[in-house]
Image: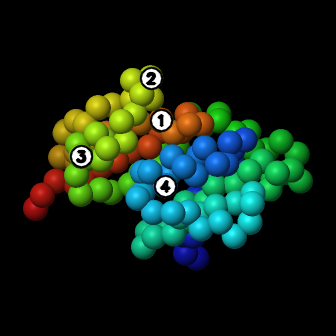
Amino acid sequence: MSFTSIRIVTDDLDGLVAFYEQVTGQRAERPAPVFAQFSGPGGTLAIASTATVGMLGGALTPATNRSVVVEFEVADVDGDFARLQPAPEDVVLEPTTMPWGNRSALVRDPDGNVVNLFSPPAT
């Protein structure tokens, strides 16, 4: 078994895609109007419209996540945080050095999902 992706289901596909394009600095692949993805060496972040999960009987509800963090390892946490210019209400944690050494900044995406931009400690 190999890990492939995490998918965020949303009612605002274009808004979420624009946010993650800003975070990643890359354009999303858009193989269908109701689906987008960002592929990288660690896996794929997929974003899908609620139209893609209609047959699941309401098992997925957009904008209700309170337990998953989407994480991106970045070279410059402070610089990326400043570049994103998150609104104050979207900042969960300003750039901070964690007790285990990671530098992290946590923000909310347009659906309220927590996104961690982090750099491991220099070795």
Determine the secondary structure under disc 4: helix
Residue receiving disc 3: 79
Determine the secondary structure under disc 3: helix
Do the residues under discs 3 and 4 have CB atoms within 8 angstroms? no
Name the front one of labels 1 and 4: 4
Residue receiving disc 1: 108
Quadrant containing the C terminus in the rendered view: bottom left
Which of the numbered marks, if any, corresponds to residue 89?
A: 2
Which of the numbered marks, if any, corresponds to residue 21?
A: 4
Q: Earlier in the sequence, mark 2 or mark 3?
A: 3
Do the residues under discs 2 and 1 have CB atoms within 8 angstroms? yes
Q: Position of residue 77 (x, y in %)?
A: 25, 47
Q: Position of residue 48 (x, y in %)?
A: 70, 54
Q: CA distance from mark 2 to mark 1?
A: 8 Å
The quarter holding residue 46 reads: bottom right
Q: CA distance from mark 3 to mark 1?
A: 17 Å
Kind of residue indicated by mark 4 = Glu
Q: Earlier in the sequence, mark 3 or mark 1?
A: 3
Determine if residue 98 is in view. Answer: no
Left or right of 77, for residue 57: right
Q: Earlier in the sequence, mark 1 or mark 4?
A: 4
91 versus 80 height, above or below: above
Q: Earlier in the sequence, mark 3 or mark 4?
A: 4
Do the residues under discs 3 and 1 have CB atoms within 8 angstroms? no
Q: Pointer 3: residues within 10 angstroms few (<14), some, or many (20+)?
A: few
Name of the residue lying farthest toward the bottom = 1
Kind of residue indicated by mark 2 = Glu
Q: CA distance from mark 1 to mark 4?
A: 14 Å
Q: Residue at x 19, y 39 (%)?
A: 97
Left or right of 51, for residue 63: left
Q: CA distance from mark 2 to mark 3?
A: 19 Å
